[in-house]
Image (cartoon, helix red, strand yellow):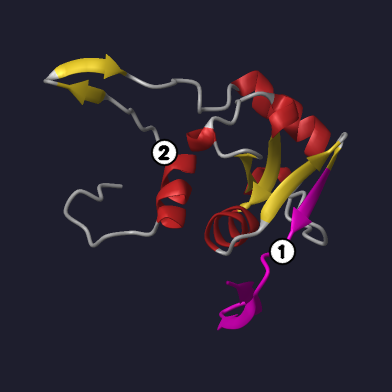
Amino acid sequence: MDVELSLPVSSRTLERYACDCTMSRVLLADSQVIDVGRATRSVSGPARWALKVRDKGCRFPGCDRPISWTSPHHIEFWGRGGPTNVPDLISVCYFHHHRLVHEAGWQVVKVDREFRFVPPDRTIPMHGAGGVRWTA
C-alpha cells in the first residue's frame, strides 16, 4: 500500500497500516542517517506456530473464527515499543484486530496469562453487511 499521494490518514489508521506492513524507519539529521529503527515487527514461523497451539482461534470473547483467519497482534503496539515475542502477542481475526482494536479504540490488556478486551468509553452502532457492528 502506498500512501505517499493519498489523502491524510488518522493516527489509528496509520497504526493499523504499520501493524501489517513491512516498514522501515530511517531518521536523518543534516542528511546523515542517525537511526534505522527496530527490525523485528514480523512474527517468525515458530512464534506463529506457538500462537496457533496456544490460541486455537480468534481470542476476542465470543468469536469463533479459526486460527487460519487470524493474525498476530502486538498487545503493546510495535510502533510504541511493544516486543515481538509470544507472551506479548495474541491471535485476533481481521474484524476484531483492525476494526475494533486499531480503529475503534478497544484495548487488549494482559492480566497474568489471560487477555482481556476493554471497550472504548463511548460506542455507537454502525450498520454493515454483517448486521450491527460497534465502532467509536
6 in relation to 4, above or below: below
- The residue labelled by disc 1 is 119
Indicate whether residue 128 is drawn in magenta.
Answer: yes
Q: Position of residue 91 (x, y in %)?
A: 69, 42
**Residue 104 picture location, percent across and down:** 57, 64
Please, which residue is most extreme toward the left here? 31
Left or right: 26 with respect to 59? Answer: left
- The secondary structure type at the circle numbered 1 is loop
- Residue that appears at 73% across and 50% down: 58
Please give left or right for residue 49 compared with residue 6 in the image: right
- Label 2 crowd (10 A; few <14 / some 14-19 / many >=20): few
Of the residues shown, which amino acid type is indicated by label 1?
Pro
Q: Which residues fall within the magenta stretch? A: 115-136
How busy is the neighbourhood of tag 1: few (under 14 within 10 Å), some, or many (20 plus)? Answer: some
Quick one: label 1 or label 2, which is nearer the N terminus? 2
Residue type at mark 2?
Answer: Cys
**Residue 68, percent across and down?**
66, 44
Classify residue 12 as left or right of residue 101: left
Q: Nearer the viewer, mark 1 or mark 2?
A: 1
Checking the image for residue 21, the label placed there is: 2
Q: In which quadrant of the rendered view does residue 109 lie?
A: top right
Residue 119's spot in the image, x, y percent? Answer: 71, 64
